[in-house]
Image (cartoon, rainbow, N blue to C red):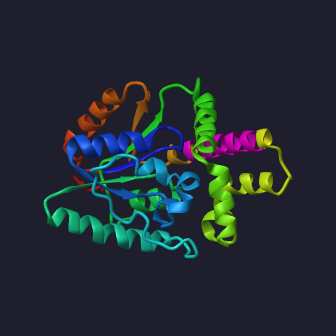
Amino acid sequence: MLLTGPTTVGKSDVAQALAVADGYEMLPADKFYFYDHPGLAIGTGLADSSSTPGIERHLYGTLDVDSPPPSPSEYLRLVRETVSAIHARGERALIEGCSRSYSRALIESELSPFQPVIGLEWKSVDGVIERIRRRVETFFELGLIEETESALAAGLSGTYVMRKSVIYRAVLDHLSGKDSLETCQDRICDEIWGIAQTQSATYHQIRGIHWIKHDPSKLEATLDKIRAVVSRPASSSQRLLSLA
């Protein structure tokens, strides 16, 4: 299955809980998850996506930070090959992430359709901004500034990850003296919220997504809703084929 939706909605926690409980193997639908650099785990989100042990993961950390990310067509090829190998072993695949180009490619491709496609959305936007702020504060508590300084010392400032990440760009401006720490944190929160809103609007324009309202405090309820969608027989009118 494909689990998508806007950033901050809680996809990583849901995906990892489902993988552990129901035996899925995981693949990324996020460009940053492809990069292999232990010193950039906080700003890329890899620290979140790999926080649960005991899950078989594929394609995570397979690129050097100097490499460009896979194009949507190359991404589709990688996913097809990986999912075919997973199915050949009698296992199930769960693709998780919020790259709009990757998710759209998976959903809309005539040659490689995937079902079910489940989109998580906020049960309520009340408190979302506060959750984003707490998440950003956690980044800094985990050592985001030190991580960025180490990346600069290692000559990584011109890499794709450092150039494209709104988080690293904001921290770089703070380290250069352009912004205060408070301004840096506010900027990251605003950028993440803006990206989340854009992603939500984009995904709601794509047909074939089963939307589930997710309350992070009621994880099991969300898992049960996902299982209910997975158990439904695929409609003959849909061009989406089951990954499960």
Q: Is residue 113 left or right of residue 169?
A: left
Residue 232, position as x, y percentages in the image: 21, 40
Q: Quadrant of residue 149?
A: bottom right
198 is within the stretch colored magenta = yes
**Where 242 falls versus 14 (above or below)?**
below
The residue closer to the viewer here, 133 or 141, is 141
Residue lying farthest to the left in this orientation: 90
Residue 34, position as x, y percentages in the image: 46, 65
Q: Is residue 177 left or right of residue 85?
A: right
Residue 200, position as x, y percentages in the image: 55, 42
**Where 148 falls versus 4 (above or below)?**
below
Question: How many labels were placed on the picture?
Answer: 0
**Where 244 falls versus 221 (above or below)?**
below
Residue 153, position as x, y percentages in the image: 68, 68
Q: Is residue 154 left or right of residue 182?
A: left
Q: Main secondary structure of the magenta part?
A: helix
The residue closer to the viewer here, 144 or 131, is 144
Residue plotted at (30% across, 34% down): 223
**Where 58 falls versus 226 (above or below)?**
below
The residue closer to the viewer here, 216 or 156, is 156
Q: Which residues are magenta?
A: 184-200
